[in-house]
């Protein structure tokens, strides 16, 4: 498609929008210079202070105390404007004082930059699209033992508005920047929890080429579950005034995406500027996706300086004008960009440089309110580890997008010519295929034994696509759908799968993909979707065993030998039994256990019940929640069954009786013992656990994870009761 350049000739009529009016729209505005800023470092002692903060869904008091530490003093000659031209050298600077005294802090520039772009009307003129570029990178350390990951994107909630996300910058396997343009799927929080594709982590360019789809997570379900009505009058953070999305990246360099917020025209008339807020959410000890307390991460919102909300004069916590964009006026904005925070006043603004590959430092830093990560987490006290961090970045940023309108004449011509665009034209010229020598190429489909299959597949896909389009067009006509909406219903070919294993339950399958949208995937890609044995709770060794069967005995064989698969599973069953009897942790399921306060009914939660049993007996090796723990199954639901098998418990029997069956908490006493939690820091199961565990159930639970695959191979499993099945012992091989 030829590039198009816009010039004048159509006059746009002006109507009553509360927007920015100007007679000339410049495509490339000159950016203002930031004010001169002087920075000095010195040692000072700060007194202990108490700060109110929100942690999870509870109001807690956070005590921030520090000894002698580096204090940041900043003075400015004038108020700096938001947009600046920042060179890579300036954005990557490290002060001489800092590197000489504390050379374990390596400053690689900022971490978050939101750059508001001009808004525009939709083609039908019924909505306004506000646009932003967001660049981010996570803080990390040389030992990979500390990282800041997982950004939160907060957008004002406006009736009828819709947010779209597009990945525009990623990295390759060598951390080199790669510009892309890939739409991002929006997933609910529950969909994210159940998924296994890690789509919330920005893919590398190689992963994108392999077909991995990027996504953002809508956090509404998470926030709804965390909301505590007891604090409603004080805490407005979960009052649905903003929409919150989450995204993460494993790369240690900046990546970027575009945010486009489409607002109905009637709502757009009420605002002048539309702001968004982006900031990091979690400090973790490992890189990865969306952070949580369950995996041992710490919420940065425990610190009031980085909270997106703040306490207003009425005593309530609020998002400020971020949640009320109609109140964002010119006192917040200069040259179409923010110069101060629209939410928590302690949020400092990052200047724009128009380059997602480098992120500048914050400006106008107030050391009294600045979220100095290096200082707060005393990184300089650990000189053995290098921290890629900055004392000039609060890991948050905001900006606005605005719509310019006025008397603008526009014409469309083909770039490099004087030819105007006609009402109808072909945007894809048909050209012959020439080789490197300039001669026409004779295409030989026989050179590749798979080529003919691919050609046939693509021809069929083309025919079926055209047929589907015609069918859907006729359907749209028959149901009297407006003609301009017909194009919204369409179908296309996505994959050519050499083999596909379907299971009785939807969204649970295995595919062996050779083509994606007509493009060759070499080697073929194996995708296992929705099956229990690939979930995070399953042991890696169990995953490896079942995955090897799929690879070696189903996908890569000319004929599937069911008897071989069954024999492997029977042998694996004996391996599991032997491992459990030896007290090994290898094949145990690993689950996340939150603090009891995180659950409405904590004693009904398996992880809580398991932890209570372990801590009752093993008082010298307590499980401290939140934590990830192994689960061992038991079958002592009643005190009678416990008494019938009391010899198995040996020396711990009296403790179990007193702490569990005679517990003053009725829910514990009535529940008996069905599980026991095992901490990860032990090498072997205690003997009392080995003697009392329900090995048969544990083995059956693991094997049953593979049952959907077995069911697809024939009548191999038997259903004993609703939701329960096992491999039949009367199979004719």
Image: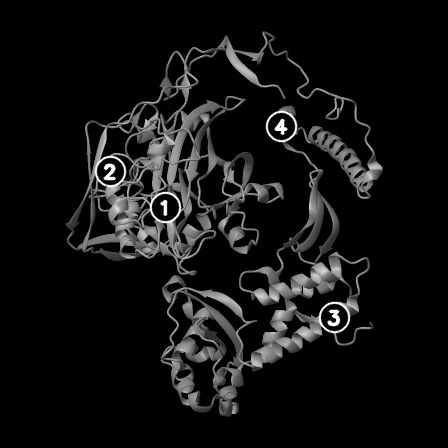
Q: Residue furthest right?
A: 446
Of the image marks 1 and 2, the number of the one nearer the N terminus: 1
Q: Is residue 174 above or below residue 528?
A: above
Report which quarter residue 609 is drawn in. Answer: bottom left
| Residues at circles 4 and 2 in contact by the CB criterion of under 8 Å | no
What residue appears at the point 48 percent right and 88 percent down from the top-left corner? Answer: 649
State the SS at label 3.
helix
**Front disc: 3 or 4:** 3
Of the image marks 3 and 4, the number of the one nearer the N terminus: 4
**Residue 721: image location, x then y, percent:** 66, 71
**Residue 152: image location, x then y, percent:** 41, 44
Of the image marks 1 and 4, the number of the one nearer the N terminus: 1
Number of the label disc, if any, that sits on residue 485:
4
Q: Which residue is mark 2?
A: 365
What residue appears at the point 61 percent right and 63 percent down from the top-left corner? Answer: 533
**Front disc: 3 or 2:** 2
Q: Is residue 722 shown to the viewer in this render?
A: no
**Front disc: 4 or 2:** 2
Of the image marks 3 and 1, the number of the one nearer the N terminus: 1
- For label 2, count other residues whose C-alpha is less than 10 Å away and answer few (under 14), some (14-19) or many (20+): many
State the SS at label 2.
loop
Q: CA distance from mark 1 to mark 4?
A: 35 Å
Q: Is residue 590 above or below residue 10?
A: below
State the SS at label 1.
loop
Q: Nearer the viewer, residue 343 or 15?
A: 343
Q: Which residue is mark 3?
A: 566
- For label 3, count other residues whose C-alpha is less than 10 Å away and answer few (under 14), some (14-19) or many (20+): some
Report which quarter residue 447 is drawn in. Answer: top right
């Amino acid at each position: 498609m030829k590039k198009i350049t816009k010039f004048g000739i159509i006059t746009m009529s002006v109507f009553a929008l509360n927007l920015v009016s100007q007679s000339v729209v410049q495509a490339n505005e000159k950016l203002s210079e930031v004010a001169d800023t002087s920075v000095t470092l010195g040692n000072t002692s700060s007194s202990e202070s108490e700060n109110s903060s929100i942690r999870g869904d509870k109001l807690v008091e956070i005590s921030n105390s520090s000894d002698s530490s580096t204090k940041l003093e900043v003075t400015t000659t004038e108020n700096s404007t938001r947009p600046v031209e920042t060179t890579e050298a300036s954005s990557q600077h490290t002060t001489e004082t800092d590197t000489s005294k504390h050379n374990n802090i390596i400053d690689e520039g900022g971490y978050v930059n939101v750059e508001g772009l001009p808004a525009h009307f939709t083609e039908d003129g019924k909505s306004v699209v506000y646009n932003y570029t967001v660049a981010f990178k996570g803080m990390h350390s040389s030992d990979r033992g500390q990282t800041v990951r997982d950004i939160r994107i907060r957008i004002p909630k406006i009736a009828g508005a819709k947010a779209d996300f597009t990945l525009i910058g990623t990295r390759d396997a060598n951390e080199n920047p790669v510009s892309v343009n890939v739409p991002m799927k929006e997933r609910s929080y529950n969909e994210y929890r159940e998924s296994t594709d890690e789509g919330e982590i920005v893919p590398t360019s190689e992963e994108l080429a392999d077909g991995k789809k990027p996504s953002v997570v809508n956090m509404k379900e998470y926030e709804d579950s965390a909301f505590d009505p007891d604090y409603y009058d004080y805490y407005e953070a979960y009052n649905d005034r903003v929409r919150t999305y989450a995204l993460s990246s494993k790369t240690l360099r900046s990546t970027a995406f575009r945010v486009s917020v489409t607002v109905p025209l009637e709502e757009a008339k009420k605002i002048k500027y539309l702001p968004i807020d982006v900031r990091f959410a979690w400090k973790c000890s490992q890189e990865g996706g969306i952070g949580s307390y369950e995996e041992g991460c710490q919420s940065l919102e425990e610190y009031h300086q980085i909270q997106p909300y703040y306490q207003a004069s009425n005593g309530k916590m609020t998002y400020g004008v971020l949640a009320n964009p109609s109140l964002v006026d010119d006192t917040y904005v200069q040259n179409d960009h923010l110069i101060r925070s629209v939410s928590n006043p302690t949020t400092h603004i990052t200047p724009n440089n128009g380059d997602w590959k480098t992120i500048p430092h914050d400006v106008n830093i107030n050391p009294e309110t600045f979220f100095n990560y290096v200082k707060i987490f005393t990184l300089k006290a650990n000189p053995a580890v290098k921290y890629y961090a900055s004392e000039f970045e609060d890991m948050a940023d905001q900006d606005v997008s605005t719509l310019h309108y006025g008397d603008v004449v526009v014409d469309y011509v083909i770039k490099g010519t004087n030819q105007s665009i006609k009402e109808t034209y072909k945007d894809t010229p048909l050209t012959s295929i020439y080789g490197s020598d300039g001669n026409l190429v004779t295409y030989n489909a026989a050179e590749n034994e798979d080529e003919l299959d691919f050609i046939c597949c693509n021809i069929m896909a083309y025919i079926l696509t055209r047929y589907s389009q015609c069918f859907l067009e006729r359907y749209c006509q028959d149901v009297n759908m407006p003609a301009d909406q017909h194009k919204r219903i369409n179908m296309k070919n996505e994959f050519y799968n050499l083999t596909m294993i379907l299971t009785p339950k939807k969204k649970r399958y295995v595919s062996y993909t050779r083509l994606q949208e007509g493009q060759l995937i070499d080697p073929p890609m194996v995708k296992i979707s929705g099956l229990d044995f690939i979930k995070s709770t399953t042991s890696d060794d169990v995953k490896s065993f079942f995955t090897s069967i799929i690879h070696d005995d189903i996908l890569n064989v000319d004929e599937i030998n069911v008897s071989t698969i069954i024999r492997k599973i029977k042998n694996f069953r004996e391996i599991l039994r032997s491992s459990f009897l030896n007290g090994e942790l290898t094949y145990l399921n690993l689950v996340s256990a939150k603090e009891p306060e995180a659950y409405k009914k904590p004693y009904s939660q398996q992880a809580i019940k398991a932890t209570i049993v372990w801590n009752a007996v093993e008082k010298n090796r307590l499980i401290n929640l939140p934590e990830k723990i192994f689960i061992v199954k038991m079958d002592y639901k009643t005190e009678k069954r416990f008494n019938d098998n009391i010899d198995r418990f040996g020396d711990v029997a009296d403790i179990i009786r007193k702490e569990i069956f005679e517990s003053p908490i009725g829910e514990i006493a009535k529940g008996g013992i069905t599980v026991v939690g095992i901490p990860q820091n032990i090498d072997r199961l205690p003997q009392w656990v080995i003697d009392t565990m329900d090995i048969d159930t544990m083995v059956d639970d693991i094997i049953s994870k593979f049952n959907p695959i077995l069911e697809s191979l024939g009548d191999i499993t038997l259903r004993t009761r609703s939701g329960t099945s096992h491999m039949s012992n009367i199979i004719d091989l």
